[in-house]
Image: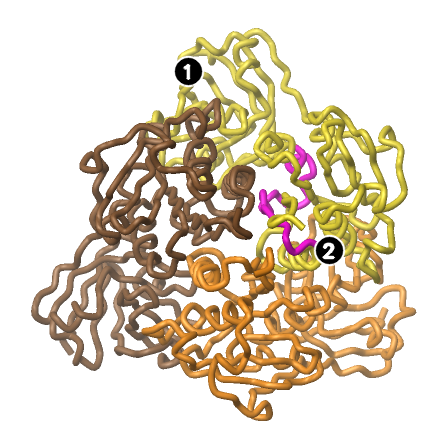
Chain colours: A yellow, B orange, C brown
Amino acid sequence: MPATGRTIVFLSDFGYRNEWVGICHAVMNRIAPASPIVDLSHGLPPLDVRGGAVLLVDSLPYLAADAIVLAIVDPSVGRDRDVALEAADGRLVVGPDNGLLAPAASALGGVARAVEITSPEVVLTPVSPSFHARDVLAPAAAHLAAGADLATLGEALEPATLVALAIPEPTVERGKIECEVLDLNRFGNVLLNVREAQLAAAGLDGVEEIQVDATSGAGRARRVETYADVASGDWGLIVDPRGWLSVVRGNPANAAEGLGSVAPGDPIWLTAGGR
Amino acid sequence: MPATGRTIVFLSDFGYRNEWVGICHAVMNRIAPASPIVDLSHGLPPLDVRGGAVLLVDSLPYLAADAIVLAIVDPSVGRDRDVALEAADGRLVVGPDNGLLAPAASALGGVARAVEITSPEVVLTPVSPSFHARDVLAPAAAHLAAGADLATLGEALEPATLVALAIPEPTVERGKIECEVLDLNRFGNVLLNVREAQLAAAGLDGVEEIQVDATSGAGRARRVETYADVASGDWGLIVDPRGWLSVVRGNPANAAEGLGSVAPGDPIWLTAGGR
Amino acid sequence: MPATGRTIVFLSDFGYRNEWVGICHAVMNRIAPASPIVDLSHGLPPLDVRGGAVLLVDSLPYLAADAIVLAIVDPSVGRDRDVALEAADGRLVVGPDNGLLAPAASALGGVARAVEITSPEVVLTPVSPSFHARDVLAPAAAHLAAGADLATLGEALEPATLVALAIPEPTVERGKIECEVLDLNRFGNVLLNVREAQLAAAGLDGVEEIQVDATSGAGRARRVETYADVASGDWGLIVDPRGWLSVVRGNPANAAEGLGSVAPGDPIWLTAGGR
């Protein structure tokens, strides 16, 4: 046995108010005691499959090459299949078959092999109908981390039958981008589903101030490099660390509030503005 | 030294807003650097000894057999004895002597040996009167994880002198269960101190809809298997992952709010209903 | 390779609502898979450099001697230098050069060597202008944990050029201390920038009740040893676990609210009172 086992990278919408994350850690630690567990995030908005899928695909470049990914956001727990995938590049990913894993699998070159996690050697019984994370998914991730082959977790399934999910694309026109809120952070920054290249495609990259309109709020934002470039109360547009265009405001102002308390999925329009 | 030390499973009511959890980790890591630390939960309601005791006993089946348990919910820190127990099955448990460990000790076959943690080789001095977690309990757990014998932590104490605590039992009659709220989760689900078998004992298992009454709210709930079986706004009764009967509502409704913002300890009545 | 690598102790103001802590863990785990990561706290008030500096210096006595410290509170990310320091006692510390590390460095005997983290072997490119934690600081800490020498991280810098920061000292007169709020905790306890010895210096250590005045609230507090010594609703003054004088109230009362919802930095006056 090597000194340190393969890492498990774990993300979910469980939060830290109860023991859901902790009991999954306990289960994995019992099966794979030498495997470090990295909690990528458990602060995803509850039941936000798309937000989890985006975070997972954005995070892939930063993970150890041999780390097993355990991703759980599962509004339909007990109805979704529980699956383990091997991507074309060898990466192992475990989670519910509800689209959460789909963008990551695509980014990794597609799914090479997939199984439904059903092995009685893996699943903890009785399986709680409402907590497959503890009884099915965490044990599967831990067995992979401890060296089990994917095929031992359950019955092979046809990759083409896996649920698909696409991250929404903005509508880019000359002088206008119609996009949406991908996510918020605790400082009130608003992530948009827009890449820097799309700003250029709309001809908005050379504009000094961009008009940011939400349904019930608006701001005029300068394109800046860092938070420190935005004066108190002013609006800025930065490329966030994950590569998404983000609306920010200088402390102590809050972009999400300034845009009318927007939430993930809300529409946003970027234009050169009429002034 | 093995590649990986014995795991420490840590639960408390410390939350994550300050460094209490982290400084205990630092202390344990310094004493037992090869021991993984599993944070079972630090989101227990502050000072809720009973909630902590219930979580601990519910979690035992999922822990590594040789993991040391460190459990801390201590409203009377500085007055309670700090103890380490060896249960009849060999499990080592560390915490305050205020009842928090009692249900777990019972579930593990009773206390075989117990010590009060007083050894100057173990305790960090000066001991902060308000933070025995850092100065007494965490060091004790780490020394056990690193291989120390229980007897080296301090003076033996008579197990019969340990503070007792019983999890409240519901009153089960024909057609009626008088119970109470054990816990809430972030989705607003309401855990009751009722096991599935008690629903049957009251003759309520065959009832299509069960009337759930709180002091200032009520709902009619169908017995369902999973969250996905409850339509938006509807009420359901499920057996939660820890085996407790729970009142849930379909998203985006919230059972705890629907029952009048109930809190742990509040009384709940389950009946077939008068309709 | 030893069974367990050198520990990294990580503190920040990132919170747990998003993936900032987790992605830094992933990056460090990829570079130094055998190194445990201790999360000292990520609950520092956002952008509170002074609060982070105080927590770090207070925590040093509890850390493993060879642990690498990674401290990040960086309101001016992208403008501050990213630095790694070796203290006179050998401790390695990584963080932004904005004063956050200064009190710790002083407590460790001063800075023996310092580098600006610029090595292309260390820094992840492209560096996000707003997330040097992930791309510069976490990789640097992990390379140190994996055994790299400080000099390999970047260009040496003159320790005297590092940004200084002093923890504010109270004004102590006979019968009166003018101090300020250092921090709050989730139970509403109010930490003051006052040490027990300063209470004595003001001649207030023998006073039975001390008058605690804030701008918009006040209380009369007894000097007590532990929380358990304060009756419900009463006020107490204790020496908190980090050695700071703290205003507390017996459950369910809340000292921070009783003093008019004070915040870090707010002024507080301690006197024998006029009654």
Please check the rendered image and state whether residue A51 is part of the magenta-colored stretch, yes or no.
yes
Residue B222 figure quarter: bottom right
In-image side of B113 versus C51 (left or right):
right
Magenta stretch, residue numbers:
A31-53
- Look at 39% across and 57% down and name the residue there: C63
Secondary element under disc 2, as helix, strand or loop, is helix
Q: Secondary structure at mark 1?
A: strand
Q: Quadrant of residue C169?
A: bottom left
Residue that sits furthest to the left in the current view: C174
**What percent of the width, then of the height, locates residue B199?**
83, 74
Disc 2 versus disc 1: nearer the observer: 2
| Residue carrying label 1 | A209
Residue B77 is left or right of residue C52, and the answer is right
**Earlier along the polypeptide chain: callout 2 or callout 1?**
2
Query: In the rendering, which numbered label is found on residue C181?
Result: none
Q: Position of residue B39 (x, y in %)?
A: 57, 59
Q: Name which quarter of the figure residue A60 lies in.
A: top right
Residue type of the residue flagged with mark 1: Glu
Q: Which residue has dot 2 on it?
A: A134
* Quadrant location, the C terminus of chain B: bottom right
Q: Residue furthest right?
A: B206
